[in-house]
Image: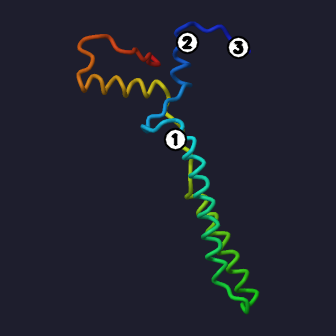
Amino acid sequence: MSTIKSPQEKKRLSLERDRRNMYGESPHASRKNIKRGKQNQHQEERRTSNQALASIGTHSSEDQMIAAEVASDTTAKVQRINGFKKVADRPLSAFLERQQTRRERVGMLDGRSAVHVPSDD
């Protein structure tokens, strides 16, 4: 059940839960690059498994065929483990803190109050 939250609690939860892309790319590009990364990973898996299977000839023994199949499976698993991984965006509070320090460093604030990010004290 939901509980009644104070405005301060709502703000704190919003800063924790809301996310911001800090990689400098637009969200549209991120959505397209995720699909592209998965596509490239699958293509790489198919290529490596086909290379392992291409090493056996038509006159190979059954043991050689089994060994090539096992090698194909292991290389595909290694590719999958080391392949594409999505990375979560940063919390809004981390984005605001980074923006605040950048503004202080550049001197953009000039004594004005900046965005207040509440701490967990």
Discs 3, 2 touching: Cβ within 8 Å? no
Secondary-structure class at tag 3: loop
Q: In the figure, residue 44 lies in which quadrant?
A: bottom right
Name which quarter of the figure residue 5 lies in: top right
Residue labelled with disc 2: 9
Q: Position of residue 63 (x, y in %)?
A: 73, 86
Task: Give the colour scheme of this rendering.
Answer: rainbow
Label 3, on which residue? 2
Helix or strand or loop: what does disc 2 sit on?
helix
Closer to us: mark 2 or mark 1?
Answer: 1
Q: Quadrant of the N terminus?
A: top right
- Image location of residue 117, percent across then percent down: 42, 17
Q: Residues within 10 Å of mark 1 (few under 14, many from 20)?
A: few
Q: Which mark is residue 29?
A: 1
Q: Distance from label 1 to label 3 (Cα)?
A: 36 Å
Amino acid type of disc 1? Ala
Q: Which residue, as the protein is rendered here, is positioned at the far right?
A: 62
Instruction: Find residue 74 and report its horizontal and vertical position in percent.
Output: 64, 69
Near-viewer residue (81 or 22): 22
**Kind of residue at disc 2:** Glu
| The one of 72 and 57 positioned closer to us in this rendering | 57
